[in-house]
Image (tube, coloured by chain):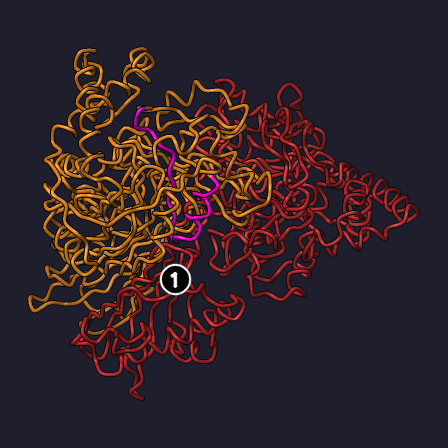
Chain colours: A red, B orange
């Protein structure tokens, strides 16, 4: 009878020249991995800033980042070892293992081990690959080749669309990121207005992409379906609520992300992933067949890797209603409250080089709070009845947000509306036809191991930037212009209402070229 | 201005301690990869039997296998390098690169280099990971979470089905592996009979999986959509025509593969991938809503990783019509013409240990040829009209097979039918109620770099084994029992007609446990 796969004797005959102690260390690591014994795992990785661990989500650099990742992972998937091959006979060796996850297929793991001064073997580099994924349900709810054909030919022929799961696609349900909701829906009889426009212009529908629950989040961490990868920043949140559309575009699985932006749900994932994002002038794109969150702020927007398809798709969605408003001087606020130092430094260096004027903007805290209240009130109007009859349907932060929304009173909402009307007038007077330029988010994407408090603080600061477009109904483009040590940050250009086409035209002059993080 | 990413100076500052010459070798490798310069690539991999190259399709062992893989790959996807990190300062070092494919996302590549006696750096181990895949269109045409909900609860509650793209699923087209066909279809108004039965018994539909063109192949290499991975054998064909259903099941993306078996399209992928496969008694499972290939041979079958869900799902599909025929003695043929030596050795060792009786079976060459002719005639009856009006719609070997089918005359088919009727009587007389046991395929899965002639010869020999069930209408189970040096091989148990349930019951006594290939 063979020894068990995590007993070193099991692999001795296949690797007679393996250095002494290596197979023992390797098997101890495998045992600790299956037991999620973080102390042993941490100990078996070299405690150095250059220690590396890579997987499909990216490359983590340094013992600390690797440990932080492991601490929130909640254990590795159950597996056994199918084959182990040792290459090297000295003080360093590479161990390649074919893994056999319980759920199927074969994975691959490559580890570079080194014997330290204390005689113990430790891992310098690990590269972990699960079996091939054929369908990532954290990114898509339904996807196909295609899911729906174009209905015409035109400027979008050859493009493929990842449709946020709030838009009706003929023959498919709208799922809204909430399984209990999805289960009760009927297939849509016809396409939503935006989907119909894109198909008629030649685009195919690649699939229906995940959203945060009822789009009430900026994080992209829907607890029902798992948090999709951020393809630009290893271990980071992808941003939401248009998480699936953004990730599908980042990975090249679709060329256009059809999304919504109520309080930043296009601009935040664009910023986190180094994409182009567009929030149109309020009312500029028809919302027929779109499940609402807060109609006074809801807009239909787009995400792309390149500017060119964004310009073509935006023109299609705007159609006849595209305004001809031009954009005035580009200005930036004198201060950026709550924006992280690294993002602010990158933004200011760019803004200085671009010669942006400076605008004294009033403190927006009151306006942001009124936005928050009126958004919550509308969200409860849209979904409160259903939520009340489906306790437990919502999970996590978005669920808590709806619970809080339930307690907003009519009086509070009336006050918030009045505040918003006043602020809209104030901002219009202050901005005029200028293009206001701000970071698209308060920092690069938070890591998944950020605390809920950190994520909340980041969200609040980001909200202070994104709410300007929502309050004024002005359009915004998020351009992938900035690189910080912790990932990309977008730059938002907020133009006067109906200046969408002018904003997009001017975007073509921007010096794009975000370096990916190492 | 920075040097280009494939110039060693680009990465010098990030890796000041890199051993002399290593970055030069690394960059030369990257240049050769992008140029698909096979000679340079071969030279930069250590010329040794223990050299390793792994990717999501598995681990290739040895310089020769790696070179063979590379020769048929047709170049690596276009990419640039986003980051390079060297770990190690002596005669061995690991280079980890973050890659940036043109189509999106970030990949990862880990290489273990060693400086040889000639002073040149060469790769001992390479581990290559593309960016995350969110949708593998070589496996699925459409897939969802779920694609279609169960319509009832029962013995299949909790199971998920990969439906071969020949069965109608309500609201979806039938694509049959032929894009020009797909483009002309309308969504099905209702489920095919088998899909309806599975859903009513509690199974959800995970997706619609790829098939070879009109199911007229045993290879699984549909040229329109790419060849799916064989999760059990690196670099091998997955088997067909139920390729997508089989691969989805192998990888755990679905628990049940709904498939068809006309001439082996369930049993061959089961054999190649180490799965359970079932071809029912002819007529035992309703074929309503199934696109035909050759109705006199077409059956609705299943693929699973474990026997238990196969038994439950088979009982659901058989329903009231499940026969109560028992199985007699297990016997094997005295000879296995065309079966590869390694598969024959594994089979005979197993059969000897199992104490199988030996049956003198007549030479089946005439019967197999008659099967081939009548299958071709029927295939042309089913699809010839459409194919004639769509020249160029078919590619590759299946296209050639249809072209040949067009020339089968009525007289040839009449003669073939008579031959088949005679052989059916002969085989029934010879077999009686015995269970005939044969290898499910003539060898382990052919590698993708096998020549068309090799694949054809293998197909012909396999056909000699699989045609017995087709000619007699007898049911067959393929069990994942054999391991050969080149991959798993299934064992087929062909029972008397209507013995499906008895075959499945007896299968539970088999000593399953295929070791995966290293």
Judging depth in this view, the residue of A491 and A1 nearest the camera is A1
Q: Is residue B205 magenta?
A: no
Tag 1: Cα neighbours inside 10 Å, few (<14), some, or many (≥20)?
many
Q: Residue at x 53, y 42 (%)?
A: B204
Outermost residue toward the bottom in this view: A118
Q: Which residues are magenta?
A: B296-316
Is residue A272 rendered to the left or right of residue B46? right
In the image, residue B414 lies at what x, y percent?
Answer: 20, 15
Is residue A467 rendered to the left or right of residue B188? right
Asked where in the image residue B136 lies, by quadrant, the reply is: top left
Judging depth in this view, the residue of A131 and B13 nearest the camera is A131
SS assignment at label 1: strand
What is the number of callouts on the image? 1
**Chain ID of residue with mark 1:** A
Outermost residue toward the right in this view: A411
In the image, residue A473 lies at what x, y percent?
Answer: 73, 36
Is residue B317 rendered to the left or right of residue A474? left
Q: Is residue B308 magenta?
A: yes
Asked where in the image residue A120 lies, by quadrant, the reply is: bottom left
| Whether residue B55 is visible | yes
Q: Residue at x 22, y 83 (%)?
A: A20
The residue singled out by tag 1 in the image is A54
Q: Residue at x 62, y 31 (%)?
A: A187
In the image, residue A337 lies at what x, y percent?
Answer: 70, 58
Judging depth in this view, the residue of B489 and A173 nearest the camera is B489
In the image, residue B218 lies at what x, y percent?
Answer: 25, 35
Q: With respect to residue A460, does A312 lie above or below?
A: above
């Amino acid at each position: 009878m063979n020894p068990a796969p995590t007993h070193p004797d099991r692999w001795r005959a296949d690797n007679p020249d393996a250095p002494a102690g290596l197979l023992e260390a390797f098997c101890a690591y495998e045992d600790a991995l299956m037991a999620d014994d973080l102390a042993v795992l941490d100990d078996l990785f070299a405690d150095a800033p250059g220690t590396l661990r890579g997987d499909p989500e990216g490359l983590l650099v340094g013992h600390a980042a690797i440990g932080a990742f492991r601490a929130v992972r909640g254990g590795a998937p159950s597996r056994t070892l199918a084959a182990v091959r040792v290459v090297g006979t000295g003080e360093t060796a590479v161990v390649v293992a074919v893994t056999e996850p319980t759920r199927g297929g074969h994975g691959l793991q490559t580890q570079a081990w080194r014997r330290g001064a204390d005689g113990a073997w430790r891992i310098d580099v690990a590269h972990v690959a699960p079996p091939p994924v054929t369908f990532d349900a954290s990114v898509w709810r339904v996807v196909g080749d295609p899911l729906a054909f174009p209905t015409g030919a035109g400027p979008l022929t050859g493009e493929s669309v990842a449709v946020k799961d709030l838009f009706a696609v003929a023959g498919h349900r709208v799922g809204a990121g909430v399984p209990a909701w999805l289960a009760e829906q009927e297939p849509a009889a016809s396409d939503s207005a935006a989907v119909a426009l894109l198909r008629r212009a030649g685009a195919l529908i690649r699939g229906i992409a995940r959203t945060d629950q009822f789009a009430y989040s900026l994080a992209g961490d829907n607890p029902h379906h798992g948090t999709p990868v951020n393809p630009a920043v290893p271990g980071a949140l992808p941003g939401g609520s248009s998480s699936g559309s953004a990730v599908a575009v980042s990975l090249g699985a679709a060329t256009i992300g059809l999304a919504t932006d109520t309080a930043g749900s296009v601009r935040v994932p664009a910023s986190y992933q180094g994409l182009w994002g567009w929030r149109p002038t309020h009312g500029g794109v028809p919302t027929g067949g779109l499940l609402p969150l807060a109609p006074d702020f809801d807009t239909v927007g787009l995400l792309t890797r390149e500017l060119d398809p964004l310009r073509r798709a935006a023109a299609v969605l705007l159609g006849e209603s595209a305004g001809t408003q031009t954009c005035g001087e580009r200005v930036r606020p004198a201060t950026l409250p709550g924006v992280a130092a690294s993002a602010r430094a990158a933004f200011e260096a760019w803004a200085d080089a671009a010669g942006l004027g400076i605008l004294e903007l009033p403190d927006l805290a009151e306006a942001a709070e009124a936005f928050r209240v009126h958004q919550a009130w509308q969200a409860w109007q849209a979904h409160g009845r259903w939520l009340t009859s489906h306790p437990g349907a919502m999970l996590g932060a978005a669920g808590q947000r709806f619970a809080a929304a339930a307690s907003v009173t009519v009086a509070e909402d009336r006050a918030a509306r009045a505040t918003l009307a006043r602020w809209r007038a104030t901002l219009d007077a202050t901005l005029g036809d200028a293009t206001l330029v701000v970071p698209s988010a308060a920092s690069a994407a938070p890591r998944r191991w950020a605390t809920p408090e950190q994520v909340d603080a980041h969200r609040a600061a980001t909200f202070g930037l994104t709410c300007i477009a929502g309050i004024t109904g002005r359009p915004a483009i998020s351009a992938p212009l900035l690189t910080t040590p912790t990932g990309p940050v977008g730059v938002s250009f907020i133009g006067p209402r109906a200046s969408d086409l002018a904003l997009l035209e001017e975007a073509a002059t921007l010096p794009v070229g975000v370096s990916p993080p190492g």
